[in-house]
Image (spheres, helix red, strand yellow):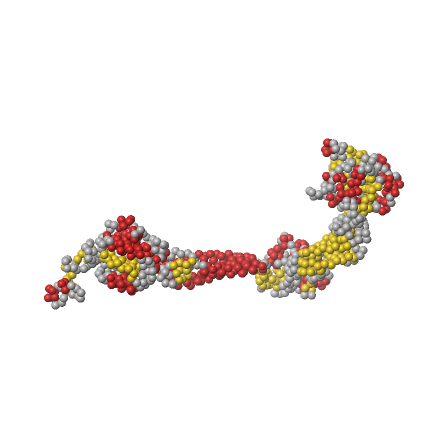
Amino acid sequence: MTAEARLLDPGLVRRIEGLELRARTVVEGVLSGIHRSPHRGSSVEFAEHREYGPGDDVKSIDWRVWGRRDAYYVKQFEEETNLKGYLVVDATASMGYGPKGATKLDYARTLAASLAYLLLKQQDAAGLLTFQSSLKNYVPPQANTTHLREILGVLAAVEPRGRANPEEVFTALADRIRRRGLLIYISDLLDDLDRTLRALKQFRHRRNDVVVFHVLDPAEIEFPFEDLTLFVGMEDDREVLADPRGIRKAYREEMAAFLDRCRRELLGDEIDYRLTPTSIPPDRTILDFLGRRP
Amino acid sequence: MTLSFLSPVFLAGLAAAIVPIVIHLIHRQRAMTHRFPALEFILRSNRRVARALRLKEILLVVLRTASVALLALGFARPVLYARTTLVSGGGPRSILLVLDRSYSMGYRSGGTTAFERARSAARDLVASLRDEDEAMILACGRRPATVGTGWSSDRELLRKGIDGLSLSFEAGDLAACLERAGPLLDGAGRPERSMVLLSDLARGGVDLARLQGIDRKRRLWVLDVGAPGPRPNVAAAAVEADQSAEEGLRAVRVRATIRNFSPEAIRDLPVHAVLAGRSSVEARGFVDLPPDGEATKEFSLPIDPRQEPAGSLFGRVEIRGDALPADDVRFFKVWIRSSLRALLVDGDPRPHLVDSETFYLERALDPVKTPTSLVKPEVVDPEGLPGRDLKGYDLLVLANVGTLPREVVERIREFVRSGGGLFLSVGDKVEPDRWNEVFGDLLPEPLWSIRALAEPGTSEALMRSVHFEDYTGEHPLLRPLAHPKPEGPRLSSVSCLRHALLKPTPPREGVRVVLKFSDGAPALVEKPYGEGRVLLFTSSIDRDWTDFPIRPVYVPLVQQIAQYLARTLPAEGRREWTPGDAPLLPVEGGGRSAAVSDPQGGTRTAPVRPDPSGFSNLEVGEVSWPGVWRVALGEPGRFDFAVNLDPKEGDLAPIDRPSLARALGEDRVAFLTSPRIASSSGAPVERPVPLEGAAFALLAALLIVEGVVAVRR
């Protein structure tokens, strides 16, 4: 079975086919599409002036403004372009939790593949970045449908391992996302939450459209265990012997506080946050996601 | 306040209290492992609830451990002896002093016996009485008896009554004692009435089931005067003795049962057996005794039947003395039989011996024909009888003898008159009228006619024959054959086709029908004649008229007839009695009396009285001492008997107090710790408080709490 066939449920494809991915903000791109791009190019309508800065094209300088103000200003133009989507998939060890064949990473793979396909289908660019303790894979965004194969290949091959280093990951990410686009972050957020949230907010502040799919196994949310159990960490050597019945209430409270913080802080910065238990079918997750986007 | 346990063996279950702890530790070790990504949340949760969880864990382990411990303690039946004070009322009192004088009170420890301690305590109690009080003394063994003249305020008189008491040889019977006490208290003169029991509370004399039925309205104070701690005792519990047939009647076999009333095994305990015949014979041996068990020791004491006259011999078995010597000796009586000479006159001798009248009889009297056979029969025909000196015989049998010369009959009369036994059987040689004329007053009843029911071998024989009736009476001749076992010899198996009928005559003294046929006609009739006896059998003693000789009952009945007529049957009745019994000894003939000598050397005159069954009994009166009691009646030693202690009283272990209190009524019983009951602060008593109920109730409560804590999240 090919990677494509393994990850794309034909039924899923059919159901989301016909939907369009719309970005809430105008994005920059190299292909024509249906989104408004904030990038002021020279072949479109004039939008506004801004001061000339290093790196700007000299040909964009509006000399009339220079004549009046004795300062260099360039023109900004509206230019319509396609969406550039970056699918960032957490492939750390914790993502390997869950029943065989239905781990969090499996779910993330399916989700990412579906979104990639959707982007490419509507002639948007889709790129992929996977990370573990450092950047693992990077597939630059492209808009051709054959690019899907490359994305799917990377997704299929990645295995959960290691522990995230948010500093390094988001620095690498920032180096690659130079233009405003859509950042789809698929993770369990069980790594350094403060740094992760901070980094996501920075991406948002740079006027990227950020979506966070917070993928968790239902057991991590409900903590349904009964018997005395030695719990062993998946990304380190820590272990703890606990009576689940005794700590269940406290655990759920801790988890609820965690989820609440994620939601509150991300939504507060206009980051699209979606708690995604792996018990919910991926197609439903995407439909919900697309249905709510303006 | 002291804590005691009625079943301490269950305290071993306390070791099981460690099980919940072990399970807890094992449970922790066997926890399953699970890789989990959100470990940080578990750690934070654990930190939050760790303390509460640990407390819950500890509490559960404690509850479970305590539950197991309480279960073991509950089964061990804890009893708390709480010392308190019984303050007696201020008004005049009637106090019944119940003093146990059963032989277990003779147990010596610390230089005194329990009985001496009881008497001392009784004196102290009497001394503590006030002027307005009164007291009575009730001495208890097997038969409770009051001492003195009843209720008295005279302390000196009461003290004398106590001093006059002596230890008995009787077994205790606390129930009979308290039953007697109730009506005595009802007749007391003071408003406040109570009784004080001074006893060693030996369980051999306590029947808890009977105590529960006794009236409980009076207060009972109990003072245990028994030895504190264990009271080991060994007793000679039983003895059987008989003349050993295996050894040709030349030895007496004695089988002694020794009982160990202590929890320790005893090895090599010396046992001594003595037989007091013409010369004393002794034997010694050793026996090993298991804890709280018994063992049997056998002795074979040789005798010479030719030297020892027939009759009773006495002996005793002794064990090494201990703190209760009364039950270390046991007496026995053995009946010695010597040979019996019988002369059989065959009235119908035949060439074929098997057809002779006395063929079967001779063989039934001496089945094995050994030099030491009990009965030595000689057979003659009627012509040979005049030449025999009857003085040398014990028994004369005239089997189908039709007639004899007058002088021979006269010699037979003299023989029977002098104590010999005469057995007469009829047959075809007997003509009733002629017979009546020849034997005259020797016959118990004159013959009337011969009744022929059928001819042998005909079909009528089976239908018309008569049978012996099965016997259910008390005649010593037939008593061994009364109430036959299903597989044993039965009189009713004998059938008869011809027999003599007797003339109906007025009843004569001493003449009685011993055995009947099924048609009511007499089969065996007895008559005393001078010092001897006559038995008349109304059919043939061979197979001519009856199948008697071929029935299993023939041999034992013939042996009994021989012994009965020769007066060598053992005396009837029990050979052994216990102190407190009043023996009745079956004897023959009433209207007499006999001198009875006790082991202490005293004598009394015992009357002989008839009873409704037609027999007579010698009324010995109450026997108080163990040993051999001699009765001067009939043959020397015939009616002598042994008195031995009841061995159950040798079990000296005290009955547990809570059980005793429950049987007597816990609300009215208190255990005194000292014999003073009249002090102003009241009588110090120990009340047993059983705790097993509380232990189980607490266990139930702990289990409920454990269940709630375990499921609580």
Instruction: Give residue A272's quadrant in the image.
Output: bottom left
Seen as rendered, the residue at the extreme right is: B407
Seen as rendered, the residue at the extreme front is: A1
| x and y, in percent, of residue A180 in the image | 22, 60
Q: Is residue B121 visible?
A: yes
Task: Residue at 46% x, 56% y: name it.
Answer: B707
Instruction: Give residue B435's quadrant in the image.
Output: top right
| x and y, in percent, of residue B370 in the image | 79, 47
Count of numbered circles in the view:
0
Q: Nearer the viewer, residue A227 or B157?
A: A227
Location of residue B167 with respect to B524 vertically, above or below:
below
Residue A6 placement, left or right of B310: left
Residue B74 placement, left or right of B598: left
Instruction: Give residue B126's quadrant in the image.
Output: bottom right
| x and y, in percent, of residue B43 in the image | 38, 62
Residue B653 placement, left or right of B465: left
| x and y, in percent, of residue B138 in the image | 69, 58
Q: Nearer the viewer, residue A116 or A243?
A: A116
Seen as rendered, the residue at the extreme top is: B459
Name the image quarter holding the C terminus of chain A: bottom left
Task: Residue at 77% x, 43% y: name it.
Answer: B364
Q: Nearer the viewer, residue B134 or A60?
A: A60
Q: Is residue B445 visible?
A: no
Location of residue B60 with respect to B588 vertically, above or below:
below
Q: Nearer the viewer, residue A96 or B622?
A: A96
